[in-house]
Amino acid sequence: MIEVKGLTKLYKIPHEKKDTLFETMLGYIKDQLVYEDFYALKDITFKINKGEMIGLIGKNGSGKTTLLKILAGIVPPTSGSFEIKGKIAPFLSLGVGFHPELTAKENLYLQGAILGISRREIKEKFEPIFRFAGVEKFKDMKLKNFSAGMVARLAFALMIQTDPDVLLLDEIFAVGDKDFRPQCLAIFEKYKQEGKTIIFASHSLDTIAEYCDRTILLHEGKIEMFGETKKVLDYYQTI
């Protein structure tokens, strides 16, 4: 379902270089910059089968979000390639693209059009979307008055209406409260039973252990280990 070959992402990090008094004075007129190479990902290769739920773990800065953004088509790789079969739903940075001056209803129409959902379909799904997000009372309120969590829940509730084949999830539970988290888990369980393919990046090792068939461990932009979830988690806790 997903095949990744030699995926690499290189960032150029600028640094000021002013070693002399002249360079310091010149810096007021024109910045003198040098660049450091930073590999967010380096030579990532793996395959994921249809219907698998794959965990993605690693310390902050290991490359988890970068990998998901590349697979979602948000960020281009520096080199390498990947292929994904089917419709993708990236649950990353939920709420990005929503317009703060539009109401919740208006934003659903706007984002629905971007996601390929017709205006008629969105209208028919208004009630379940708002009910799932827990914002039924705020349909006509401008989004600028929503909390970050409310916006993310609304975006999540809309995304699950796209009926994707592949889901890319990045710490989605961070936006949820004690009522929203079980709703998310129920959706993932449903998708898993339907044979959807899921990549789930999280720091919650208990959730990874419970739901993921196999797990990828990233370390400094490279795959440290990829295999049965229990074995990967046992190894991760020793390093």
Image (cartoon, rainbow, N blue to C red):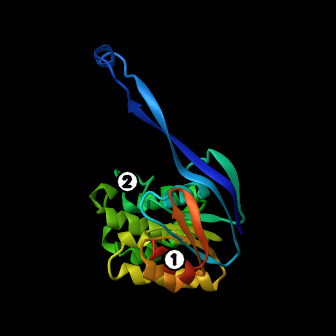
Assign a secondary structure to mark 2.
Answer: loop
Q: Tell me the kind of residue under disc 2.
A: Leu
- Mark 2, residues whose alpha carbon is within 10 Å: few (<14), some, or many (≥20)? some
Which picture quadrant has residue 181?
A: bottom left
Assign a secondary structure to mark 1.
Answer: helix
Q: Is residue 177 above or below residue 99?
A: below
Nearer the observer, 200 or 45: 45
Nearer the observer, 106 or 8: 8
Residue 218 placement (x, y as % from top left): 53, 64
Q: Quadrant of the C terminus?
A: bottom left
Residue 91 placement (x, y as % from top left): 50, 65
Q: Is residue 211 above or below residue 109?
A: below
Q: Tell me the kind of residue under disc 1.
A: Tyr
Q: Kindly identify the residue that appears in the image at 56 percent across and 44 percent down.
A: 10
Report the mark closest to the observer, 2 or 1. 1
| Gap between marks 2 and 1 measured at Cα | 48 Å
Q: Earlier in the sequence, mark 2 or mark 1?
A: 2
Label number found at residue 102: 2
Q: Kindly identify the residue that appears in the image at 62 percent across and 44 percent down.
A: 78
Q: Kindly identify the residue that appears in the image at 71 percent across and 74 percent down.
A: 49
Q: Is residue 232 left or right of residue 2?
A: left
Residue 225 placement (x, y as % from top left): 59, 70
Residue 227 placement (x, y as % from top left): 62, 76
Q: Is residue 27 above or below residue 171?
A: above
Which residue is disc 1 drawn over?
A: 235
